[in-house]
Image (tube, helix red, strand yellow):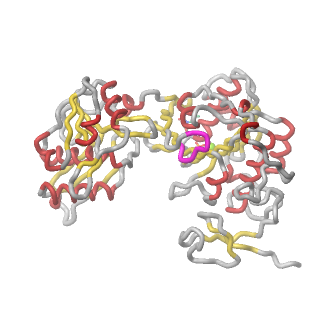
Amino acid sequence: MPKSKTVFFCKECGNESPKWLGKCPACGAWDSFVEEPVAPKSKAGNGGAGPAGRLNGGTKAAPVELSKIDTQEDTRISTGIEEFDRVLGGGIVHASLVLVGGDPGIGKSTLLLQVCKTLVEKGLNVLYISGEESLRQIKMRADRLGKFNNELMLLAETSLDNIEEILAERKPDVAVIDSIQTMYREDIAASPGSVSQVRETTGALLRIGKNLGISIFIVGHVTKEGVVAGPRVLEHMVDTVLYFEGDNSSAYRVLRSVKNRFGSTNEVGVFEMQSSGLREVKNPSEYMLQGHPVGEPGSVIAASLEGTRPILVEVQALVCKTTFNMPRRTAAGTDANRVNLLMAVLEKRLGLQLGFCDAYVNVAGGLRVAEPAIDLAIVLAILSSFKNKPLPENSLVFGEVGLTGEIRGVSQAEQRVAEAVNLGYETCILPQVNAKTIKNSKIKLIGVSHVCELGKLL
Ligand code: TYD
Ligand code: MG
């Protein structure tokens, strides 16, 4: 009997090695190698990820003049769900491959089933392929979403060879694969969900989609670290990577594009999970600020930016005398290290005795904000709670804080101020450099250039 051969793959980048390595020489990740049976050389090469993977299934392609390429058929298909279209960059591109990642139970299947619903109602031919749920389970979910006015085709299948046959036969306009970790190719010995299976099945789907002109959505599970399980090459292979995120405790969900070959990245769509599926949140600022306290110390409204869209969020801080040897510091909804750093700036530049205080910082509403423009809001929330004095009524804040206590300008200040005006805010505390460039008579602008100037605002 021939000895069965195995190779080692890096989970991060898909790098192959004949022996186990502690550190991947290609991407530098530690302890990322897993052992898998050798995959036979597939027809699709490495699935189109590299130059060797031809999209047209191995026939030789001739060069074409740029001006002769017709983009007419690449007009986008609108899904009818505005928030979803925006994240895709204006609708589904013909024959594109989109990866939708997210934690289990966040609502990926629900979202895609809802997209299928609006697509079939437009008269498109849609095939939903599930490897996780039975047809009856999908039907039960669909019943919660309301009546489907047109037929949606369902398939419970995990073998990619069968799926390929069915796709070639039916040629749907759009197909959904839920999820890539359950799909397998028979010619690969490794189990479904392994690095080589995920890579090869995605490669095959890429080839099928481009050849037959089918737009394919694939669902991918997310690991603890928050990346799609399987190799990073998966993200390189697909055209668009969307992440569906949110707190399991709140009904609020954000769909974010982290890679998009056909649109801008970092665009977000906001949804709310209800008993009858996901509902679009058209004005997230109003939604995020529902029921926020007015005139309370420690509560500051910040203007953050999600993609190209300004979203107002409430930053809360609670600073109180500690009863521990080591003060407790926690941050929810933002970077805890950043909060520690900003507190150090306040201690050093303003002489605030924060060393004897516990500090809790929270971005209310379940949104995670990591951009530096939220710094000034965090600083003011801490200061406001420490002094027990509220900020001026109806005010909002944005700006980045540097290590020497300087307040630095941020991008797209104009949009942030415009959103504040829309929602009826009267005062905006912002970096001096930004204040100089903005001409908006409907709001009072207070430019600040150093944290020393913040004391007089409270
Ligand atoms: P699901 O789409 O199955 O998540 P994923 O595919 O990402 O694992 O969503 C499951 C959750 O959504 C589950 O906890 C129930 C909830 N849900 C609703 O609240 N309302 C609904 O209408 C549906 C269909 C699901
Ligand atoms: Mg699911």
Q: Residue at x 47, y 29 (%)?
A: 281
Q: Residue at x 76, y 43 (%)?
A: 210
Q: Is residue 350 above or below residue 108?
A: below
Bounds of the magenta span?
257-263
Q: Residue at x 71, y 58 (%)?
A: 50
| Magenta stretch contains residue 262 | yes
Location of residue 287 in the rendering, given as x and y in whole percent from the top left corner: 39, 30
Location of residue 47 in the rendering, given as x and y in whole percent from the top left corner: 74, 56
Location of residue 286 in the rendering, given as x and y in whole percent from the top left corner: 37, 28
Outermost residue to the right: 1
- Whether residue 363 is visible, yes or no, is yes
Location of residue 340 in the rendering, given as x and y in whole percent from the top left corner: 27, 58
Q: Residue at x 15, y 45 (%)?
A: 454
- Whether residue 175 is visible, yes or no, is no
Q: From the viewer's perspective, is 349 left or right of 156?
A: left
Q: Is residue 417 above or below residue 216?
A: above
Of residues 245 and 412, the one drawn nearer to the viewer in this rendering: 412
Q: Is residue 405 above or below residue 196?
A: above
Of residues 340 and 319, the one drawn nearer to the viewer in this rendering: 340
The image quadrant where one finds ligand 2 is top right
- Quadrant of the image for the C terminus? top left
- Quadrant of the image for the N terminus? bottom right
Q: Quadrant of residue 345?
A: bottom left
How many numbered circles are shown? Answer: 0
| Magenta stretch contains residue 396 | no
Of residues 278 and 437, the one drawn nearer to the viewer in this rendering: 437
Q: From the viewer's perspective, is 265 left or right of 353?
A: right
